[in-house]
Amino acid sequence: MHSDPIAQVVLCLALILAAAKLGGDLAVRVGQPAVLGELVAGVLLGNLPNLPFLGIAFLEPLKTDASIDMLARLGVLILLFEVGLESTVKQMLQVGLSSLLVATLGVVTPFALGWGVGAWLLPCESAYVHAFLGAALCATSVGITARVLKDLRREKTREARIILGAAVLDDVMGLVILAVVTGVISAADKGGSLDLVSIAVIVGKAVLFLVGSLVVGVAVSPRFFTLASRLKSRGVLLSAGLGFCFLLSWLANVIGLAPIVGAFAAGLILESTHYRSFVDKGEHELEELVHPLAEFLVPVFFVLMGARTDLRSFTEPGVLVLAAALTLAAILGKQACAAGALGGDLNRLAIGIGMIPRGEVGLIFANIGVALTVAGRPVVSPSTFSAVIVMVIVTTMVTPPALKWALERRRETGA
């Protein structure tokens, strides 16, 4: 009997979505972000086939199915687009010198520590692996920290503004570093190498793309959406917004950057004033329209990342040590960034803790690293990938209670 290829895909999707929602619910019930539950659910789902006595080997294709992988990659673009929509160019320009300094220290210090950990514990690995580990530690999850601050009703404090502004800038800088690292590794894969001039060109392209797309986009997008609003068919705003996101993602890839850079830039560019004509006609805001799509695709990415974490790799010598060292470097690296907060009477401990979670951004960096190869050999081994996933889980898990403690401690003691 002929089996329709879609059957395997829809079965995987059913399992992924069920696992994501159950895991997310359990995480929220114990005071953790839903993304953590989705990631852990993926780890469990992906490792069940390794227990042959359970008789569920049919789960194994979930980790390698090309269609599921493509949906997960699409979910990453939607996620970065959504993160960008939550911020604006104006907000980025208004975050002030404190956020810029905090973000800079929050990228440079973890990158150096991550590289150092790699050179120390993985001396036989190439410098590409060390650079990847440094890049993976640069990220900060805007969403997780913002959720904690909102739950505590502290989102309007000076510390909150500095943290959130720095987290956005942190992601922009992290994406630039990621572009450099992937560019260097891609050149090595083709048999070449990059000198300082070539690296400067990659940085220049990344900065030029971000700045250029923001400047041009802010000028063009209002006219684009005004023209689109004249169309009479349904769903025009969502289609136009996603089309804009995918176009910039494609352009980013054309000039040698990760498509997520374009998706993030597209979200930053689009503001509610650009598509006001749609809202005036009774349509929802673009963020509200994108949200259901993100609710479907983004968990696919998180669960798949967890599923690709092979727990058997932790039996290999040094993996748990690497995971612990990376986690410590990730936490300490972000504490250093609090020194960049200018002004008196600031809760610098809360600022440092608020920058700790790697969350979804750390997973995106890890996912890109897994796809990199040199001479046909993966740059990141399964054991190194698993260690990075542990770092993401721990930093995501410790931030909510630690940030709550730091803010309430300051309130109670006045210190």
Image (cartoon, grey):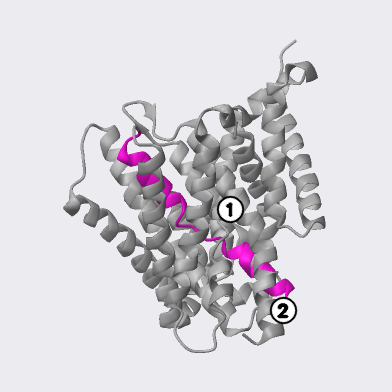
Q: Nearer the viewer, residue 2 or 412?
A: 412
> Three-letter amino acid code at disc 2?
Arg
Classify mark 1: helix, strand or loop: helix
> Three-letter amino acid code at disc 1?
Glu
Q: Quadrant of the N terminus?
A: top right
Residue at 68 percent across and 67 percent down: it is: 147
Mark 1 and mark 2: Cα distance apart in space: 23 Å
The numbered mark at residue 360 is 1
Disc 2 crowd, CA 10 A, few/some/many (<14, 14-19, 20+): few
Side (left or right) of 37 relative to 378: right
Q: What x and y, as percent, mark residue 362?
A: 52, 51
Q: Splitting the image into 4 quarters, where does residue 86 fall?
A: bottom right
Q: What x and y, as percent, mark residue 366?
A: 49, 44
Q: Main secondary structure of the magenta part?
A: helix
Residue range (magenta): 125-153
Disc 1 crowd, CA 10 A, few/some/many (<14, 14-19, 20+): many
